[in-house]
Image (spheres, helix red, strand yellow):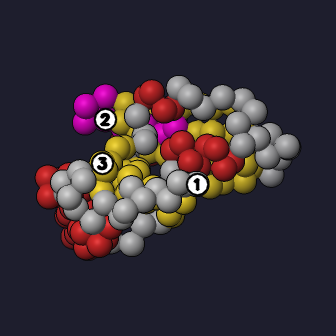
Amino acid sequence: MKRWLLMGWLMSLLAMVGACDWVAQQELKPGQSTLEDVRKLMGKPEMVWEEGDGRQVLEYPRSPEGAETWMVEIDANGRYQGMKNTLVDANLRQVRPGMSRDDLRRLLGKPGSVETLPLKNELVWTWRVQAAPGRTEMFNVHFGDDGRVASTSRTPDPRTINTQ
């Protein structure tokens, strides 16, 4: 019984986080809303990417349970310009061998999990991504000894695997 209550609470919390993103998309107006408006609706960002021309990109990962990472663009005058989910197929297809960790983080945002595989001497960053409407899977990026992307893989989402 406690397990079901905990699962229900967790799912409600996740729904609220997703609802906050939906509200933010409806409430924030490009060119009108301010950085303060973004922070009121979305909270503190995980990372703030500073651009050379004064612009900022605020990173809002919804992992490990969510399948979105929102990058919110703020212009040099502190005005909201828009937001986009980075965990989309077009971005996943851009991940290539040789890519640096910084470039990958900038492209996809913070991974939902980071795991070291000592026997393979490998580091793996993983994101939950939409595979089809209503279905998620895990997108894994494997790093080589040089700290650069060696390969990618996709695995089933452990949340959806029947463990009975």
Q: Could you classify mark 1 by the number of other residues whose Cα lies within 10 Å: few (under 14), some (14-19), or many (20 or more)?
A: few
* Residue 147 falls left or right of residue 134: right
* Residue 80 falls left or right of residue 19: right
- Looking at marks 1 and 3 on the same chain, the residue that comes earlier in the sequence is marked by 1
Which label is found at residue 122?
Answer: none
Q: Nearer the viewer, mark 1 or mark 3?
A: 1
Give the structural element (helix, strand or loop) at label 2. Answer: strand
Q: Is residue 64 visible?
A: no
Give the structural element (helix, strand or loop) at label 1. Answer: loop
Q: CA distance from mark 1 to mark 3?
A: 19 Å
Amino acid on which the number 1 mark rests in the picture: Gly
Q: Nearer the viewer, mark 1 or mark 2?
A: 1
Residue plotted at (72% across, 48% down): 123
Which label is found at residue 135?
Answer: 2
* Residue numbers of the magenta segment: 132-139
Amino acid on which the number 2 mark rests in the picture: Arg
Q: Could you classify mark 3 by the number of other residues whose Cα lies within 10 Å: few (under 14), some (14-19), or many (20 or more)?
A: some
Task: Give percent across and percent down for residue 76.
Answer: 42, 59
Q: Which residue is mark 1?
A: 52
Magenta residue check for 133: yes
Prevalent SS, magenta region: strand
Give the structural element (helix, strand or loop) at label 3. Answer: strand
Amino acid on which the number 3 mark rests in the picture: Gly
Say above or below: 151 vs 159: above
The N terminus sits in image quarter? bottom left
Q: Which residue is mark 3?
A: 82
Of 38 and 32, the residue lying toward us: 32
Task: Give percent across and percent down for residue 146.
Answer: 85, 43
